[in-house]
Amino acid sequence: MFNAMSKNYLEAAYRRAKPGGTLLFLLGWGAIFSISGVSFGQEKALERAASVIQPQAYVSLQPVPRGRSFDVAVVAKIASGFHVNAHEPSESYLIPTKVTAELPPGVVVVETAYPRGVMRKFQFATMPLRVYEASFTVKMRLRAASAAALGPQKIALNVGYQACTQDTCLPPANVSAVATIQVAAADTPAYPANPAIFSSGPAPKFPAPR
């Protein structure tokens, strides 16, 4: 018997599935749940999904004076043999990759820039899909307000994604990274940091949610 969590997940995933891929999806998950019970298979699948991406966070400016804008980058390495959907996937049924931030008081997101991704053909889809492979970098432009708390501040970053191989997909997963900034008085000199990360060309930008 499926437990409530398993049943709810399968029902939600079934609604998202593309008609042509529904049977493959259900067969794949049926095989997982048949291995030594539902909870064991589900736990192993979730653990595997969460290990596909390894994120690292970087800051463009140290210290960050009050009133200044700065960037935070999440550089995510993808395990060999896997890909994840782009932030703007090519099909509506796909789960997009998304980076969100838990900000300290007085720090706000101005915009977020995601890479466009590449088009690839996979066995489980009839059309090429837009994905990220090997690694991807997401950059967030932030601003420290004039009343931002001084001193070291942590920015908790969450990467939500769904990882797939050439023929199967794992359940959606979330992994985290932390960026640390040093907020200083408005007249404090600031210096560029991590130039190798922040000197690359622009990526498509998305305004912060209001």
Image (spheres, helix red, strand yellow):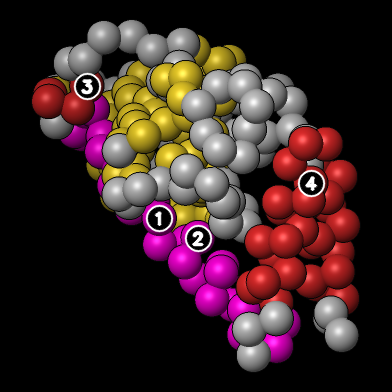
The residue under the point 22% across, 21% down is 198
C-alpha separation, residue under disc 1 versus residue under disc 3: 24 Å
The amino acid on which the numbered mark 4 sits, given as a three-letter code, is Thr
Of residues 189 and 164, the one drawn nearer to the viewer in this rendering: 164
| Residues in magenta, as a range | 37-63
The amino acid on which the numbered mark 3 sits, given as a three-letter code, is Phe
Q: Is residue 171 magenta?
A: no
Quarter in which the N terminus is drawn = bottom right
Which dot marks residue 52? 1
Residue bearing mark 3: 198
Q: Nearer the viewer's eye, disc 4 or disc 2?
A: 4
Of residues 27 and 139, the one drawn nearer to the viewer in this rendering: 27
**Numbered disc 1: secondary structure:** loop
Q: Nearer the viewer's eye, disc 1 or disc 3?
A: 1
Residue bearing mark 2: 49
The amino acid on which the numbered mark 2 sits, given as a three-letter code, is Ala
